[in-house]
Image (cartoon, rainbow, N blue to C red):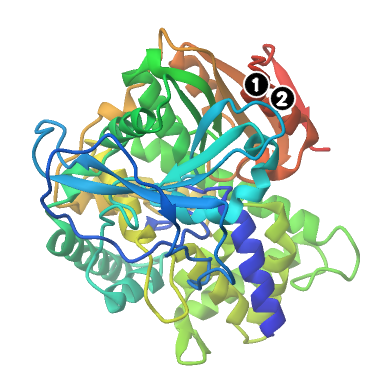
Amino acid sequence: MARILRAAATVTALSTALAACGGYGNRAVSDISAPTATAATVTPSKTPSKTIVWGPCTDIQRPGGQPPAAPDRTQQCGRLKVPLDYAKPNGESIDMAVIRVKATGPGARIGSLVFNFGGPGASGVDTLAQAAKAFTNLNRRYDLVSFDPRGVGRSSGVRCDGNAMMDKFTSMNTLPTNDAERAQIRLTTKEFVTACGQTSGRLLPYVGTVNAAADMDRLREALGERQLNYFGISYGTQLGAVYATRFPKNVGRFVLDAPLDPSVSMADRTLVQTKGFQHAYNAFLKDCVKEPGQCEIGTDATIANKNVVKLMDDLKDEPLEVRDRTLTQGLAGTGIAAALYSEMTWPLLDQALGQAIKDDGRILLALADSYNGRLPDGSYTTLMSSFPAISCVDTAERPTPEQLAALEAETMRVSPLFGGTGMGLICSMWPVPGSDEARRVNATGSAPIMVIGGTGDPATPYEWAPKLTSELRTGVLVTYKGEGHGAYLSGDACIGKVTDAYLIDGKVPAKGITCPNS
């Protein structure tokens, strides 16, 4: 079993860079794994600096919360001071944590390539430290750079009380069948939201994507770059789109992989993502049973699905004991969602579900913990608190109870396994108002922006890719016909070739390019 759990951690680490985003059930779910260091506090300081002092990376965390076996001397870390409130640029500031992997050659250095791997809420520092080798081709010509966005990890990460509150919130059941169960979900969500306001209230108004985009332009200046070269995945595509809208003349070579459509309503986003997860789940079932006798959860897709449904129903009434913890229906649902982000994790999902059906919930709980940012010592990264903080300040929508009830009913019809209110319930209670500024994008005047959409993406469904391409005005769409969240790291040779040609040689993709899953 130890070997299996190590395998789960390994697959999780690979999936981190596929940066998930979105909402499922009645709470937020984000990256499969986004380990971060203990959050810094917001403290007054002098005028924000435009320089970074680089040094060794001393607090990198792997997906399980452990430090690397040995320091990687190719990686450098530093901090950049940025204004807490851009309306008061000379007022209070926060430190933004940054990481760099310098260009290795051969070939002339092009400059810096800045990454955001998604979330919102994922630590770019830890993710790049783990994933840099997946970008070896780009690293020959670019310094690879990433950062913890404001409100995340080391950059004044949002916290919502302590570990007990996070355990309660992440383990709550998410598929209510009666009013009493819905009332319990509302109560637990209210407790969580209240804890966020009490613990991080001073920071909450300032953690949105518009401010993060301004931070990214400060980073560009500090790196000495005339224009920003950027690779955004999942939520990172929204951050990139907002940056291109606000700083179009500063856009260099931009890749937006697994794109969000920032303009969609909260309800539409939840519905489309519910359909995406159900599609991925159906594809997983079909793949699982294609070889006779190889699928642990059933001999055909119908039987396999019935076994999963029964497992979820049973867990609702009687959670499985896993050492000193329990695997609830909510945690099991999170574990399933986690493993649907990449085809690489489908065999592990079959094994996890098969074991849980036999009353062993260890693998499914491990997947859920990685998704939720829960570390082996019981502490949490800021992922599950940063995610709603950024998401809710990025929209002015505050759904009514009637709207939430209608959304739940509609998504449950689409998917009894993944239906729910998504971010709607949390944002309806959020302690600070939001703004729609980050939902309006138009990069007119920028250089061409490459947008990659995957036809089998569960978290950012393909229909958002052409929409974002159109909204940007300068977007160029590349279609990836394959499963999973994110195309570049899928291993598809066509996607790799087209993307590298654009980022390294400046060759803008031809209109209408489609890449097969080779």
Q: Residue at x 20, y 61 (%)?
A: 196
For image coordinates 56% across by 74% down, the residue present is: 366
Q: Residues within 10 Å of mark 2 (few under 14, many from 20)?
A: some
Residue behind mark 2: 498
Image quadrant assignment for residue 516: top right
Query: Residue 16, position in %: x, y?
Result: 56, 54
**Residue 218 vertical placement versus 30 (above, below):** above
Q: Are marks 2 and 1 in contact (CB under 8 Å)?
A: yes
Q: Secondary structure at mark 2?
A: helix
Residue 58's spot in the image, x, y percent?
43, 64
Look at the picture and state if 481 lies above or below 409: above
Q: Viewer-proximal residue, 49 or 1?
A: 49
Question: Where is residue 456 drawn, in percent x and y?
Answer: 66, 40
Which residue is rendered at x = 48% and y = 65% of the image?
61
Could you tell whether 130 is left or right of 201 in the image? right
Q: Amino acid at mark 2?
A: Val
**Structural distance between the alpha carbons of marks 2 and 1:** 6 Å
The answer to whether any part of residue 483 appears in the image is: yes
Q: Position of residue 455 (x, y in %)?
A: 66, 34
**Relative depth, front residue between 149 and 518:** 149
Pick the quarter of the image with the C terminus.
top right
Tell me the quadrant of the picture where the N terminus can be found: bottom right
| Element class at badge 1 | helix
Identify the disc placed on residue 502: 1
Q: Residues within 10 Å of mark 1 (few under 14, many from 20)?
A: some
Mark on residue 235?
Answer: none
- Residue at x-position 58% and y-position 45%: 458
- In the image, residue 280 sits, relative to residue 367, either above or below, namely above
The amino acid at mark 1 is Tyr
